[in-house]
Amino acid sequence: VAGPLLYRLCEVQLPEIILHLSISTVNPIKSPLPHEGLLTWANDFCKEFGAASIGKCLTSFISWVLKECESSNVKVKATAISLVGEMYKQLGPVMKAMIASVVTKESLKAQMDKTFDSCP
């Protein structure tokens, strides 16, 4: 239900603002459903508008997605990893460099390398 509304908001306002507000709203919620929903929408957003349209908040957006990659919920984690893959397809080495500069945990680095290797 929220997806179409978020798309319309991105058409009239900078997508980075809509993403920032959406993440700020979902972050404190403990239920995994809103997290999975926003990640799914963000993946569709990247396909529709392009990951580059995220703009100035790309670094904070990637940090949020990486945090979600460490979720204990399997669906949230899988959706976040899928989003990383989509962004890597679009941004290539830029995405890889940004993630390398942020990730400190070896297990997450290994997961990201595996994700990058599986992307065409």
Image: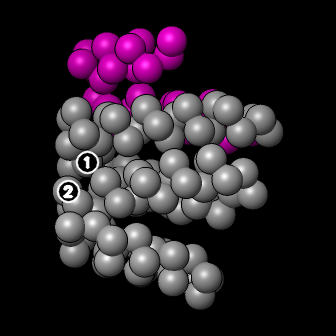
Residue kind at label 2, given as amino acid type? Gln
Pointer 2: what residue?
Answer: 90
Is residue 5 shown left or right of residue 63?
left
Q: Nearer the viewer, mark 1 or mark 2?
A: 2
Is residue 107 shown left or right of residue 52?
right
Q: Which residues are magenta?
A: 1-28
Pointer 1: what residue?
Answer: 51
Residue 24 visible within the image:
no
The one nearer the camera, 99 or 20, is 99
Residue in view at x 43 percent, y 32 percent? 41
- The crowd level at tag 1 (other Cα within 10 Å; few <14, some 14-19, many 20+) is many
Query: Mark 1 or mark 2, which has the lower sequence index?
Result: 1
Residue in view at x 22 percent, y 33 percent? 48
The quadrant of the picture occupied by the C terminus is bottom left
Report helix, strand or loop for mark 2. helix
Residue in view at x 57 percent, y 77 percent? 108
Q: Position of residue 23 (x, y in %)?
A: 55, 38
> Quarter of the image holding residue 14?
top left
Residue kind at label 1, given as amino acid type? Ala
Residue closest to the far bottom: 106
